[in-house]
Amino acid sequence: MSPLVLPGVIIGVGLLMVASKTGGVGGFPIVIVAHTLMVLPFVLRSILISLENMDENLEKAAAILGANPMKRFIYITLPMLRPGIGAGILFALIMSVNEFTVSLFVTARSTQTMPVVLFNYTMAYIDPTIAAVSTIYIVITIIAIWLLDRLVGIAKILRLEGKS
């Protein structure tokens, strides 16, 4: 849970130091590690909430009826985890696309993320392009939340969080 507690600047500087020691500054692997580190707590929390609210009796019944562990996982556990996995994917997508602070430290010119590109653009030019891109970001986020609600059901996820 440290990415939730530590400021992004500290994580970014720490990752920059690790990348400089290993020779991976500005490469795709360090960018992927940085973004994974930043979104992991959100994904884990949403999946853990689904796991806590899962009915274990269904798996036990499947085992009694002769289902092997793989079939129990595929047909029982995975469908019950679907709301948590969907919410985790949505959180990861939104957090990763909008991550600026850590990305500023670990990206190079060839691996810049969209927020870093927009930041550099605002330093060089003064025009309304940034406002248009921000509007597109907001619309994409609203569409992602709407799709998640249609596919998984946000109300179901919120009810699961209320029980824990």
Image (cartoon, rainbow, N blue to C red):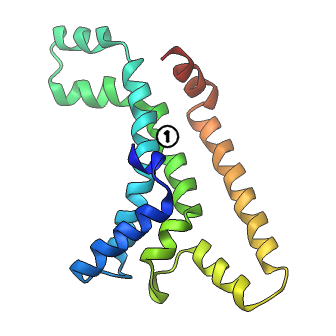
How crowded pointer 1 is (Cα within 10 Å; few <14, some 14-19, many 20+) is rated as: many
Q: To which quarter of the image does residue 156 belong?
A: top right
Say which residue appears at 78% left-offset and 64% top-offset. 135
Say which residue appears at 74% left-offset and 72% top-offset. 133
Q: Where is residue 31 in the image (x, y as percent from the top left)?
A: 40, 71
Residue bearing mark 1: 86
Amino acid on which disc 1 is placed: Gly
Between 53 and 151, the one lying in front of the other is 53
* 81 on left or right of 75: right
Q: Position of residue 114 (x, y in %)?
A: 59, 74
Say which residue appears at 26% left-offset and 28% top-offset. 73
* 93 on left or right of 72: right
Q: Residue furthest right?
A: 128
Q: Where is residue 160 in the image (x, y as percent from the top left)?
A: 52, 21
Q: In this view, does 130 lie above or below 64?
A: below
Q: In which quarter of the image is the N terminus?
A: top left
Q: To which quarter of the image does residue 80 belong?
A: top left
Q: In this view, does 62 lie above or below 139?
A: above
* 89 on left or right of 31: right
Q: Is residue 58 above or below residue 74?
A: above
Q: In this view, does 140 lie above or below 158?
A: below
Say which residue appears at 30% left-offset and 12% top-offset. 56
Between 133 and 121, the one lying in front of the other is 121
